Image: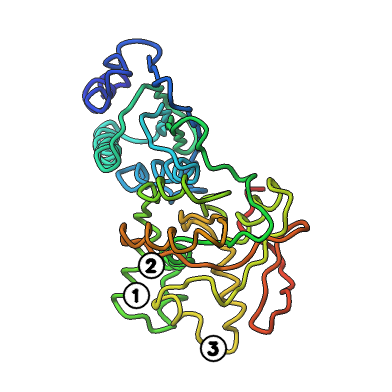
Amino acid sequence: MDEFDWIQTYLAPLAGPEGLQLLDDAALYTPRGDQDLILTQDSLIEGIHFFKGEYGAGTANRLMTVNLSDLAAKGARPVGYLLSVAWPKHLKSADLQGWMQAFSKGLKTEQERFGFSLFGGDTVKTDGPMSISATFIGVVPSGTAVLRSGAQDGDDIWVTGTIGDAYLGLRLAQDTSSILKHNPTPEDLWVWEEAFRHPIPKLIFRKTLRRYATACADISDGLLSEAGHIAKASRKSLIVRLDDIPISSASMKWCVGKDNKAKRVELATAGDDYELLFTARPKNADHIQIGAAKLNLAVTRVGKVTEGQGVKCLGSDGKALILEKLGYSHN
């Protein structure tokens, strides 16, 4: 199956009217006059962002999630995306066709879940590892996008969901023995694997976020790292209480022991959570909790915004911890 067969067989059915049936060299999209466009782009490289040889639906899900989570952090609704895929030349024709079908099925699943369509893109073959990227287009009511730069003195710091499960899911996939020595239950393993393999961007929270959040970032490179991004953009200091960072019961078992504090820091700096870290005025705490409860989404206050610069993470004694890193580094 060549590039054009794949496009017409598997990708054209995913295209909306903006994609012009994927028969043109561009897409045509006209936003409403009362909307702002939110654009984001992320790339994944085989062997770095996903495991070697995993070309199917799971990798498509990861590509969708990393981009949709960026839109979620802005309070945006996704409307479409441009896709670029470089398939490895070493794949045999029959195998390639199977992977193409599985990858397309993964794209379709996420499109149907969140209500957007394919606008277009490009496909090529490469001598190197698989490389995929997507440019997503989202919309928000004009003037309502939530930026990283809006945190104010006295704001509460909030986080959705739990932190660290995806990291332990990655550890499980990389080295099962290092995780099994902690005697996790089958339910614990399921929590970690689901968080790593099937993360869900928090798009459902966008209306509450737009209404009450002063700043927001999605947690891709670690909670403390994202707090640093908000601090830098807002020119404030974010004070995070380590003991208040929400951890699932499964991951809490992993933290048990003399090195409890170090393990909690490890979870707070690992990344791949795709939860939301946001700031809001204290007077809106009840509204935020009510809005989240209606969506069955857990939210937790983990700190405060103050004058100053950077991020401080406080231990149980109230003293700032000395940290080697705040999160995952792409360098």
Disc on the earlier residue, 3 or 1:
1
- The residue wearing badge 1 is 188
Question: Whole-percent x and y of residue 171?
Answer: 47, 67
Q: Do the numbered discs 1 and 2 sit on residues whose CB atoms are within 8 Å?
A: yes
State the SS at label 3. Answer: loop
State the SS at label 1. Answer: helix
Question: Whole-percent x and y of residue 84?
Answer: 43, 28
Count the labels in the image: 3
Instruction: Left or right? Give the position of 30 relative to 255.
Output: left
Instruction: Tell me if I can see residue 194 in this picture.
Output: no
Sort mark 1 into few (<14), some (14-19) or many (20+) by Cα contacts within 10 Å.
Answer: some
- The residue wearing badge 3 is 257
Instruction: Tell me if I can see residue 279 in this picture.
Output: yes
Q: Nearer the viewer, residue 269 or 60?
A: 269
Q: What's the residue type where badge 3 is placed?
A: Gly
Question: Whole-percent x and y of residue 166?
Answer: 44, 62
Q: Nearer the viewer, residue 241 or 152?
A: 152
- The residue wearing badge 2 is 192
Reply above or below: 286 against 56.
below
Q: Name the outermost residue toward the bottom.
A: 258
Q: Which mark is residue 169?
A: none
Q: Residue at x 49, y 31 (%)?
A: 38
Reply above or below: 315 against 219.
below
